[in-house]
């Protein structure tokens, strides 16, 4: 097989896995073929190969799901990632104080994605999952990261942004977003009101390395009916303080309020 052919096979296998990861429960060959645009025969061969390595598993009903090998890779990533390890006690403390869904987001300079999540004990939560990417300009965590970017990085993102509306409330212009980012820089936290997901409000604050470079964010997501606008400032300050404490841990200081 040529080098290009090998890369193409790998891309197809990754496409199959990505489709499976986005599909709740087990999924069949026909569904995967339709979702990826690949022939059924190709999907079948890919699944057989992945199954041999326990990357996918086949159930009694014939459907396929992500296998234990992926969990092994995930644990390896988490074990090597400093941010989730250091931040978890802080996000747990914030979760105990709010009893709402708390997310920890990592930012690698281009993409932001969830690396930890503590679910609200209440019956209504968020449709998010660890490992999923999040849109910067429609989420509170993403906006707080953008507000902390240097001018060159921010301009680069804004030039490529399509401002796709996730809901009817999503901001639609660069001018609106830049005004929001100015406000976030003043407050130290950002928030969005049902702009990324209908019925969900969110407050987030950036985690910084060296006081300037954003490497992630912490956020609290709450169903809109449970969060009054009058409660936003106090919750925002709590989220901001949590982000500051994680930033201090990342930088190796011992000045974390409330202990580790």
Image (cartoon, rainbow, N blue to C red):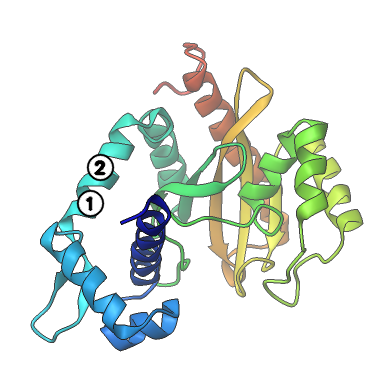
**Label 2 crowding class (10 Å Cα cut-off): few <14, some 14-19, many 20+?**
few
| Residue 25 shows in the view | no
- The structure residue drawn at horizontal position 69% and vertical position 59%, both measured from the top left corner, is 138
Is 163 drawn above or below residue 105 in the view shown?
below
Camera-nearest residue between 79 and 156? 156
- The structure residue drawn at horizontal position 62% and vertical position 75%, both measured from the top left corner, is 198
Residue, disc 1 = 71
Where disc 1 sits, the SS reads: helix
Residue 99: image quadrant is: bottom left
Q: Is residue 137 left or right of residue 44?
A: right
**Residue 240 has which mark?**
none
Question: Where does residue 172 sit, x and y in percent of width and height?
Answer: 83, 66
**Label 1 crowding class (10 Å Cα cut-off): few <14, some 14-19, many 20+?**
few
Q: CA distance from mark 1 to mark 2?
A: 6 Å
Is 84 drawn above or below residue 39 in the view shown?
above
Q: Which residue extends farthest left?
A: 60
Camera-nearest residue between 9 and 4? 4
Quarter of the picture containing the C terminus is top left
Where disc 2 sits, the SS reads: helix
Is 243 drawn above or below residue 236 in the view shown?
above
Quarter of the picture containing the N terminus is bottom left
**Residue 75 has which mark?**
2
Is 45 drawn above or below residue 206 in the view shown?
below
Q: How many numbered circles does the render carry?
A: 2
Q: Which residue extends farthest front?
A: 2
Question: Where does residue 254 sit, x and y in percent of width and height?
Answer: 47, 11
- The structure residue drawn at horizontal position 61% and vertical position 48%, both measured from the top left corner, is 141
State if disc 2 and disc 1 touch (CB < 8 Å). yes
- The structure residue drawn at horizontal position 43% and vertical position 31%, both measured from the top left corner, is 83
Camera-nearest residue between 98 and 181? 181
């Amino acid at each position: 097989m040529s080098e290009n052919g090998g890369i193409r096979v790998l891309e197809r296998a990754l496409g199959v896995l990505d489709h499976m990861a986005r599909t709740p429960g087990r999924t069949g060959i026909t569904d995967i073929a339709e979702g990826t645009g690949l022939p059924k025969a190709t999907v079948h061969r890919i699944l057989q190969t992945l199954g041999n390595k326990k990357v996918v598993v086949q159930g009694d009903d014939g459907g396929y799901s992500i296998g234990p090998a992926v969990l092994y890779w995930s644990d390896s990533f988490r074990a090597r990632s400093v941010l989730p390890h250091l931040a978890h006690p802080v996000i747990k403390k914030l979760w105990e104080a709010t009893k709402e869904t708390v997310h920890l987001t990592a930012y690698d300079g281009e993409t932001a994605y969830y690396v930890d999540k503590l679910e609200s004990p209440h019956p209504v939560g968020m449709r998010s999952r660890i490992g999923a990417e999040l849109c910067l300009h429609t989420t509170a965590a993403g906006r707080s990261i953008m507000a902390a970017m240097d001018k060159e990085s921010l301009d680069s993102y804004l030039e490529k942004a399509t401002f796709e509306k996730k809901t009817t409330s999503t901001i639609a212009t660069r001018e609106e977003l830049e005004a929001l980012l100015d406000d976030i820089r003043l407050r130290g936290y950002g928030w969005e009101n049902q702009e990324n997901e209908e019925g969900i409000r969110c407050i987030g604050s950036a985690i910084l390395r060296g006081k300037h470079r954003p490497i992630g964010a912490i956020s609290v997501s709450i169903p809109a009916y449970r969060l009054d606008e009058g409660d936003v400032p106090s919750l925002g300050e709590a989220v901001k303080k949590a982000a500051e404490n994680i930033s201090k841990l990342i930088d190796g200081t011992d000045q974390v309020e409330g202990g580790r």
